Amino acid sequence: MSGGVKNLMRAAPALALLLLGACASTPAGQPDLLAFIEDGRTTREQALLALGEPSATYEEGRILAFRLGSDKGGYFLLEKQPGFLSVTYSLMLAFDEAGLLRRHSLVALRAP
Amino acid sequence: MATRGAPEVLRWAALPAVALILAGCPIPLPAGYEASSRENVSAEPLDWVTIGVTTREDVLLKLGEADGAAPDGTWLAYGSAYSKGGVVFVLFAGGSAAGVGSERMEYRRIVISFDEKGVLSAIEPVTRDCWEGILGMGSSGERSPPCLKIESRE
């Protein structure tokens, strides 16, 4: 048996796993993505460090908006693009003048 | 050199479209929201808002990120695009496809205005129904522009 064929046979199981794995969808959602959010405690800086750049800001950055998708695993962040393609939730964070979270809401953009 | 008038050009463009309708397979387009549209813009009046009391923060926390906003924050626009269904006539030939059709759309938009203190001062709901044309050739396609811009006040 030639070396090329032997190498191919050795690689076959890995290749099969790769092909099978490509069919399976892994949930991208994180169950604890929003666990840090707590009114009266979470700071604006903590929110930005945990969630990154907001998709929109209002009232000179006092109110932040983030776009979220969801799956069996939990929530995942989505980047801003025209329209709300694949966006299932809009996370809204309203801070006070000191940068402390005053109120927040997770708004469902799609019908359940 | 003589140029063709618009009606003549339209007549020439209409011929392939009519041929497609006559020879193509009709494919129904199901009703439903456009993929990029939000679904939380109600046709009913917003019973949770009070002019002179509700704030910009209240609106944002209730409806989420807006589709459009004034640079100075004086208004927010929320909108949705819903298809009531339609039909496309598709012709397959020589490994390629062409299609022409129409879809009935319902656009809904609410523009919410605020005063200088961020308190709600006006609500302008608009709903518009229209037919939109669809034309496709190979992998490219065009559709007529929406009859209502949901992200602006226009």
Image: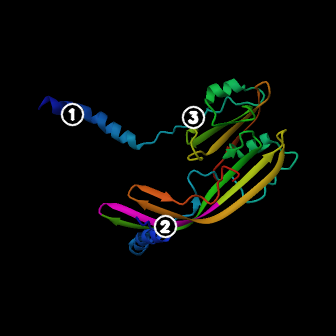
The subunit carrying tag 2 is B
Are labels 3 and 2 on one chain?
A: no
Residue name at image x 82 percent, y 40 percent: B118
- Is residue A36 among the parts visible in the rendering? yes
State the SS at label 2: strand
Residue name at image x 67 percent, y 63 percent: B128
Magenta segment, which residues?
B94-106
Q: Quadrant of residue A79?
A: top right
The subunit carrying tag 1 is A
Asked if the residue at tag 3 contacts the one at tag 1, i.e. Cβ–Cβ closer than 8 Å, the answer is: no
State the SS at label 3: loop
Q: Which residue is mark 2?
A: B101
Residue A30, numbered label: 3
Residue neighbourhood size for the residue with mark 3, other residues' Cα within 10 Å, grouped as few (<14), some (14–19), many (≥20): some
Q: Which residue is mark 1?
A: A8
Residue name at image x 49 percent, y 67 percent: B101
Q: Quadrant of residue B21?
A: bottom left
Q: Earlier in the sequence, mark 1 or mark 3?
A: 1
The subunit carrying tag 3 is A
Q: CA distance from mark 1 to mark 2?
A: 51 Å
Q: Quadrant of residue B124?
A: bottom right
Type of the residue with mark 3: Gln
Residue at the right extreme, as displayed: B52
Residue A55 x/y as whole percent? 63, 37
Using the image as rendered, state which of residue A101 and residue B9 is in the foreground. Answer: B9
State the SS at label 1: helix
Type of the residue with mark 1: Leu
Using the image as rendered, state which of residue B117 and residue B88 is in the foreground. Answer: B117
Type of the residue with mark 2: Gly
